[in-house]
Amino acid sequence: MAESWHLSVAFLENHTAEAARVLEALPTAEASALLETVPERLGARVLGAMLPTAAARLLNAADEESARALLHDANTQTAVAILRHLPESARVRLISGLSPASALASQMLLGFPDDTVGAWTDPEVVTVSPNETVDAAITRVRAAPSSDPVQLYVVDAERRLLGSVTIHALLRAPTAGSLVQLMQPVAATLSVMMPLASARDLTMWERSLVLPVVDHDKRLLGVLRRSAVTQALRMRARPAIADAGAASVAGALAASYWGVVSTLAGATTALLPPVKRVLPDE
């Protein structure tokens, strides 16, 4: 049993997407119980790779403390995609257990249809006012929650987008300087209500993999990443897998893990050059 569990964890860590497919097809109670035994960060990563409907099913079967821990370690877009498919009572309870900032962001994104840019917007961006100093902006970047911002967005008192400053330009500028001197116009923005399918094929992705998202009053809501668009559309196109009913979660994951390992080993062996057979008398 312990060996199967260790193989399951190895599979979740090293082949997350494949493991997610397996968990989607396994009995809800067993799959949910397994996620409760692995580190929350790993469990959240696996949930993010699953169809939101299947992830919501597992989260709804978990005890509330574990469910909150998993949501806490998931990024906002993943959490919202899952929350959208939970019963309203469970959704309200789990949101109440998030930090105030995460709860507010989740409630905002849940207000948009799941096939729009708004539903997949990342609200965790660093915003600054045009009159702030470079030193103050650097302090904001250092305090940003677990993000690696490429640029800062300059907004007015009502959060209307005025421009942006790249991290590279910020770090090269005198610390006492004002951001208004570094600020550059934003080349393109996305409307929060734009359909994801329309956003996918925009030529502006050729210039940047991250684009700011604004509402009808040009207020900044966050950014949309091209990877999030690809993930969202792929999930919407993939059919759900029925619950398998009686399969063993640990056994199925372990078997799938060995299947992946065997396939990789076979592919590696096929790449090796042929070796001439050596006869005994040689």
Image: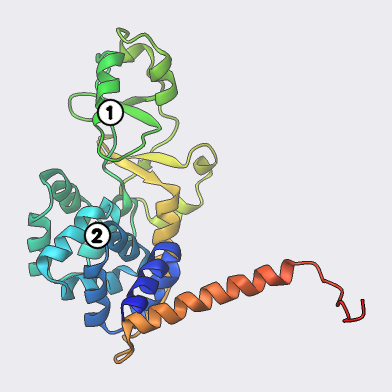
Name the residue at 20% across, 70% down.
59
Q: Which residue is mark 1?
A: 142
- x, y (%) of residue 10? 40, 67
Colour mode of the rendering: rainbow
- Mark 2: which amino acid? Glu
Q: Please say whether residue 160 is visible from this viewpoint.
A: no
Secondary structure under tag 1 reads helix
- Mark 1: which amino acid? Arg
Answer above or below: position of 226 versus 67: above
Name the residue at 31% across, 85% down.
243
Q: Which residue is mark 2?
A: 40
| Distance in Å between CA atoms under marks 1 and 2 | 25 Å
> Is the residue marked by circle 2 packed among few (<14), some (14-19), or many (20+) residues within 10 Å?
many
> Is the residue marked by circle 1 packed among few (<14), some (14-19), or many (20+) residues within 10 Å?
few
Secondary structure under tag 2 reads helix
Name the residue at 87% across, 74% down.
276
- Going from the N terminus, do you reach mark 1 or mark 2 first? 2
